[in-house]
Amino acid sequence: MNAWQESFEDAGSSALWSWRLRAACRDVDSAVFFSPDGERGPKRAAREARAKAICASCPVIRQCATHAIRYGERYGVWGGLSERERLVFRLRPDRLLAVLSVAPADPTDEG
């Protein structure tokens, strides 16, 4: 299955995830963004670099990263941030300001 092609169950879910419709990863295999069991070292680094390259050109990278941090996504690359990078923001939320512009949620932006 490609990264963000699962169907929406209701209008509430659709609104919450509307930014995903513009995501650069929409037609990319989700295996690029999520590590298989036991993946380590250079293989993991290479896969994450491929994922981050896709994220770098994404028009909704900020919304994706914000979602992942706000909702505690524990796995995968989201908004150009790896699991380890997002952990820093969970442990030190003050560092989030250096990466994302924190503003009140815009309903047209994130749902």
Image (cartoon, rainbow, N blue to C red):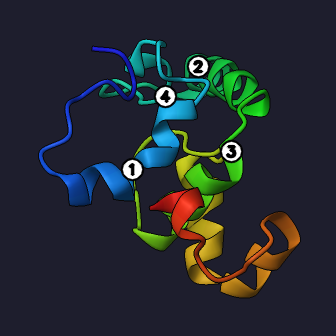
Q: Dot 1, crowdedness within 10 Å: few (<14), some or many (≥20)? A: some
Q: Amino acid at mark 3?
A: Ile
Secondary structure state at the residue bearing disc 1: loop
Q: Earlier in the sequence, mark 1 or mark 2?
A: 1
Q: Identify the disc placed on residue 61.
A: 3
Residue 89 x %, y %: 64, 73
Query: Which residue is label 2 attached to?
Result: 47
Residue 3 x %, y %: 39, 24
Q: Earlier in the sequence, mark 1 or mark 4?
A: 1
Q: Is residue 35 above or below residue 2?
A: below
Outermost residue to the right: 98
Q: Amino acid at mark 4?
A: Phe
Residue plotted at (56% across, 25% down): 44
Query: Which residue is label 4 attached to?
Result: 33
Query: Which residue is label 1 attached to?
Result: 17
Residue plotted at (49% across, 19% down): 32
Q: Earlier in the sequence, mark 2 or mark 3?
A: 2
Secondary structure state at the residue bearing disc 4: loop
Q: Dot 2, crowdedness within 10 Å: few (<14), some or many (≥20)? A: some
Quadrant assignment for the N terminus: top left
Q: Amino acid at mark 1?
A: Trp
